[in-house]
Image (cartoon, rainbow, N blue to C red):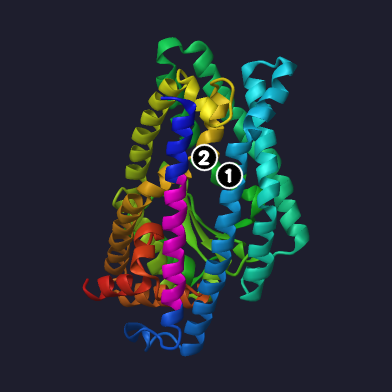
Amino acid sequence: MTASIIRAIYLGLFGGEFLLDWFLNILNINHSLKNRNAVPKPLAEFISIGTYRSSVDYTLRKGRFGLLNSVGSRIILLIVLLSGATGALDGLIAPMNLPAYWHGLLFLAISATVLSLVNLPSSLYSRFVIEEEFGFNTMNARSYLIDMAKQIPLGLVMLMLLLGGLYAALAWGGFWWPLIAWAFFMVFQILMIVLYPLLIAPIFNKFTALGEGSLKNRLSALAERCRFPNRGIYVMDGSRRSRHSNAYFTGLGRSKRIIIFDTLIDALEEDELEAVLAHEIGHWKFGHIRRRLAVSAVISLAAFVLIALLLNWKEFFIAFGFAEPSLHALFFWVSFFSSPLSFLVSPLINHWSKRHEFQADLFAAKQCFNPEPMKRALLNLSRGNLSNLTPHPAYCFWHYSHPTLYERLKSLDNA
């Protein structure tokens, strides 16, 4: 298969993804407009018309900007693909005669920097215009720049470590290099899960142990009742960036920490917070995290086998602007050009994720001896985050990793 045919196939997939994604977004926007004047009947007794219209306005604002942004991002992708910019950059670095690792690292660092700068206006508009308009943003320009100043060296260090391991596997692994690279990648991934709450997250946020009191007693009793091993309950200062709220646990084994946003504590009653935490524990109890890691391991192993095959296929690299096969070129392809393929499998992944969410909701209802706290928590979170209450079913099918509010409430009613 020639490079021109490979490029034509890719452009066909690219065009199909763009048209389908555009169609789904238009459907979702029109569906929201159509239902703007009345709260959906099953939710009418819980959601005021004012809050509902604000959620529709927020959905429309993000959806319309998303349409514009999707056109811009795809134009950039086409420019990179058709102009041969990646090959030109690779060619500029080649005369330096750097070792393969340093060549790849320099190429990826420059590429990431340029693409980040190109996407910066979109990020700034989303946060400082849309999020500001609806009262969610709590950042100023200074804190935004400080975050960027932290992210750049951290991202570079992680890229250096990951790329170093992969190039070492390629250089010294011989026939077995894909298997060795896969093993390194899995160890790297697990180390990041373990080290993230200890070393990385504190760079960006402040974590303080939940103070003594009835809330801590209630949540500690829940964790003990569920036999959930953890290193404590911590409050994160999420309000320094946004008024959106969340809770999660992080880490593996007994290193797990329960993290609650300060905004969530402000938004929910104690029994509702207990239900949200029980939901997160439900993901652990049903082995959802382990299953996702296992699936990730299988997919990444297949990916490394495919990478080994592609490294011998020069026409593939020529199709995307590179003169010669290289590991950094494949790294760039996965990061920048692979969205049409991931878009195709997203409904399957989302369906799996929704099943997990239903299971975790029902677990929370059981652990709280009543579905009402979980229902009230979901309603309060939906109101506070201005969630879309009337998404189009086709858009949900393709884009939503969580069930809609109505679906979750209905499932809890049937518990």
19 inside magenta stretch: yes
16 inside magenta stretch: yes
Please name the predominant secondary structure of the magenta segment in the image. helix
- The residue at 76%/61% (across/down) is 141
**Residue 124 to residue 406: above or below:** above
Bounds of the magenta segment: 14-32
**Residue 314 to residue 12: above or below:** above
**Residue 139 to residue 335: above or below:** below
| Front one among 361 and 104 | 104
- The residue at 63%/25% (across/down) is 104
Q: Is residue 343 left or right of residue 413?
A: right
Q: What is the residue that sits farthest to the left in this orientation?
A: 414
Q: Secondary structure at mark 1?
A: helix
Name the residue tied to disc 1. 77
- Given contact means CB atoms under 8 Å apart, are the residues at marks 1 and 2 in contact? yes
User: Where's residue 110, x and y in %?
Assistant: 70, 35
Looking at the rendered image, the quarter that the C terminus falls into is bottom left
| Front one among 185 and 322 | 322
Camera sees residue 382: yes
Rate crowding at label 1 as few (under 14), some (14 to 19) or many (20 or more) other CA atoms within 10 Å. some
User: Where's residue 228, x and y in %?
Assistant: 37, 52
Q: Give the total of numbered labels.
A: 2
Q: Which mark is residue 337?
A: 2
Camera sees residue 271: no
